[in-house]
Amino acid sequence: MVQTDTIFNNFAGVRSRTFFVSLLCEFLGVLIFSFLGSTVSGPMGPWVNGLALAVLIYTAANISGGHLNPAVTASTVFCGFYPILRQHLRRAGPARILGGICGSLLVAGLLPGASVGMGDSGPGCFEPAKGLTKSQLFGWEVVMTFTLISAVYACGIAKPGHGSFTPLVVGLTLTACAGTGAQWTGAALNPARVIGPAAVFGCSKSTWWIYVLAQIMAAALACTVFAVVSGFGPLFPVKSM
Amino acid sequence: MVQTDTIFNNFAGVRSRTFFVSLLCEFLGVLIFSFLGSTVSGPMGPWVNGLALAVLIYTAANISGGHLNPAVTASTVFCGFYPILRQHLRRAGPARILGGICGSLLVAGLLPGASVGMGDSGPGCFEPAKGLTKSQLFGWEVVMTFTLISAVYACGIAKPGHGSFTPLVVGLTLTACAGTGAQWTGAALNPARVIGPAAVFGCSKSTWWIYVLAQIMAAALACTVFAVVSGFGPLFPVKSM
Amino acid sequence: MVQTDTIFNNFAGVRSRTFFVSLLCEFLGVLIFSFLGSTVSGPMGPWVNGLALAVLIYTAANISGGHLNPAVTASTVFCGFYPILRQHLRRAGPARILGGICGSLLVAGLLPGASVGMGDSGPGCFEPAKGLTKSQLFGWEVVMTFTLISAVYACGIAKPGHGSFTPLVVGLTLTACAGTGAQWTGAALNPARVIGPAAVFGCSKSTWWIYVLAQIMAAALACTVFAVVSGFGPLFPVKSM
Amino acid sequence: MVQTDTIFNNFAGVRSRTFFVSLLCEFLGVLIFSFLGSTVSGPMGPWVNGLALAVLIYTAANISGGHLNPAVTASTVFCGFYPILRQHLRRAGPARILGGICGSLLVAGLLPGASVGMGDSGPGCFEPAKGLTKSQLFGWEVVMTFTLISAVYACGIAKPGHGSFTPLVVGLTLTACAGTGAQWTGAALNPARVIGPAAVFGCSKSTWWIYVLAQIMAAALACTVFAVVSGFGPLFPVKSM
């Protein structure tokens, strides 16, 4: 069973060995997720991304919570479900972004034809399809990321959730979203996946911020809906005022 | 674990905050389900529809029961598994139909080339394949919707059911049915999915009622078979006479 | 949870209402399984067959055990896991074969272009690929059916098994086998699936017995391996001597 | 539920009947896994391999642990999670390699056009794609095998793990890896799968050792990361010094 309490306790003890182990897990998880998800091409794209996310969350769940997605963490922080400690935020965010960057570096090293700084054709780079306006790009990423984060809330944070089904559900949510949205936005749903290739290959220069902004917007939206349903977390700032 | 009792209790308290939260969940669930399922094209169609249904039921299950399908609710009402209160029926039905309509509006807004009132080529519109007679269309939708609702009965309402496997099973039932039936009927299995696009894009003018009639027929049929196996629910009208 | 004991008890009481309900379930289950699995064409074939099997076993599991496959029942009877009562065998076998036949009749009614007695091009008919010898056909069906029945033993009959995972595992076993074997033998793995279309469309005249023989051979083989691992069932004939 | 303790106890009693039953299971499991995974071609490749692995682990899990992969066993032995008895290693290793070889022999017998000693076009043979350097081949196999073994550790060995989800997670890990990596390395992730076809068809003469070396490297790496997270097993050699 996914042990939600253990997860939060691990993060609570920021100075402990457990905390560093958690950071290592998140780093490696995002790295492998980015590598597998960026190198795939063709019809297996939504499956490799969704299944890789699912199995890596299973692998990391009992150690670090296995978010592997800064937008999910941001949403839980907004609603008070994470210890809002400066040190935590200073480290956990960068660990995942760094994982995304190292994943793209690994792509550059292991994929024939890929090289650092190769631009918009870099594997794993996100770019909206032709004909999609910037507002539509923003809308798609909000809807998809909102769906993903809401699944995390309902299955992994609410009680009773769905225990060890959670990683599978979250991964299949990505598959369902990418199965239709990949042809329009690339189906990022995750800031670390956008920033990693952008930093390594130098792509998405004019659009990366729309993706990230939409994902943060979705994080706030999902947190709001969840708060209407189940209330805020114990660390919600207004509560402690 | 999916908590069947909680689900029914939430709906029982029609005036409570929980009830309005349930309606919100059903509305958002059908909206996102319609959006993802209507925008997909090509071989991922049965998968995106089935997986989106599964993950949205997971997300909504512990709040509203996550039916997301008026035919399923109709069937449970026929057999006495839902509080038959006027207020409930007045609100829960429209919430889902409204979700379907808003899902199609979102499609019109976010999908390049789609626009309100565009007719039979509207994304998510249902139309039988050429060569399929009206009786065959009716037959296909009855068989497929019957299979879907029977899975809901066996996994989510009968005791012992299959707990948190239920949303996955229901979603995969849609994938299995759509995997073969989508080429013939489009594989609707859900009145909200038929009425949403029909209202927004103005399509399925001569066939929408066959879909809906077949689905209601399947609802009655599935309820009958379930009653033979397990008996009627506590709210079956004849019981209280 | 799948309740193995309930399943066997239901079948034990041959004259009870429960027993007739079980027959109804098996009949409807095989009918729908045959219908969905026979009408599918193209790359979704292994998926529709495997997922339809999985969800129909979920639906029938707690009522009739949800075998939906005479080869599985034959194997459990060989090893003593089923009440070997004449009345049971007289009825349960025909109920499934009848389900397969009615499934093919439904195909003939609902699929444009299909008609009773249309011969080898009938939807759902099994025929080995060109270049495959009769011994190779026999070998493929033995290996695949053995894999399927062994999964049933390990997950659904052995204790501790895998509870409510069992139907999913059995369905995915069919998907895995059909994913490679469908191009060679059609991947039947089930006498009811072979006999149904053969009877309705008049196909597989020279090969149907090879399929069925291989499946019965696999049933005996799987039962033997399971007996080596876990022993025979309480009704194994030699035990009661 | 997967009973980890039972698994290790079965292997502990090397002379017992249970141990020989375990060897039989591993032999048959690898044989069928190799057969199904080697005969598949086209887009179902990652699915047949991943699903076959999942269902065969389900089938073998409660008897032998169902590793079906010498690299996984090697990793657990490195970290002290297996009884390091000479007799065990002498028998369990060869049982799996023998399973791989017999699987390829079965392919040669049942697949039209396949024959012993046919060389690099033998079904199931691994060969890197053109343009992939030896270091890149090594890197891909390390990353993918590391991901697979880490999933085994997190779900099947760590406590609390993910119980009966484990075989599904491990199988889907293979699907996710093969979904992208199959086009570059063939996605072996398993020495028995490399050595079996190499021995029977006489292929991979200049590359098989790179695959096996990368897999053993990944085994050591995964064991190291797991030890940082959770500590070594009770049989870790240095502990008993």
Image (spheres, coloured by chain):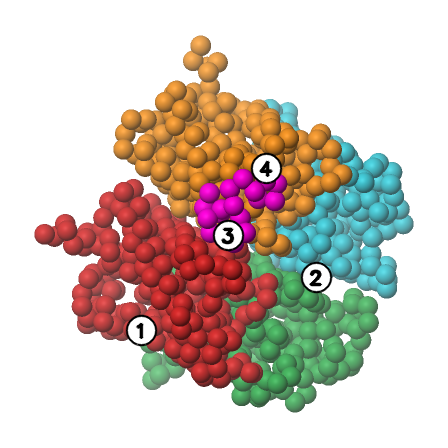
Chain colours: A orange, B cyan, C green, D red
- x and y, in percent, of residue B1 in the image: 48, 43
Do the residues indicated by labels 1 and 2 lie within the same chain of the protein? no
Mark 1 highlights which residue?
A: D95
Question: Which of labels 2 and 3 is toward the front?
Answer: 3
Q: CA distance from mark 4 to mark 3?
A: 17 Å
Q: CA distance from mark 2 to mark 3?
A: 37 Å
Assess disc 2: are there few (<14), some (14-19) or many (≥20) residues with their C-alpha within 10 Å of its C-alpha.
many
Q: Give me the chain letter of mark 1.
A: D
Q: Quadrant of the C terminus of chain A?
A: top left
Q: CA distance from mark 1 to mark 4?
A: 50 Å
Please name the residue shown 52% across and 45% down the image: A115
Foreground pick, C206 / A95 = A95
Please name the residue shown 40% across and 42% down the image: A28
Q: Give me the chain letter of mark 3.
A: A
Assess disc 4: are there few (<14), some (14-19) or many (≥20) residues with their C-alpha within 10 Å of its C-alpha.
many
Mark 2 highlights which residue?
A: B180
Foreground pick, D49 / C87 = D49
The magenta region covers A105-122
Residue A111: numbered disc: 3
Q: Is residue B122 visible?
A: yes
Indicate yes or no whether the magenta region holds residue A110.
yes
Question: Which of labels 1 and 2 is toward the front?
Answer: 1
Side (left or right) of B210 relative to B239: right
Mark 4 highlights which residue?
A: A203
**Quadrant housing residue D7:** bottom left
- x and y, in percent, of residue B77 in the image: 68, 43
- x and y, in percent, of residue C7 in the image: 48, 64
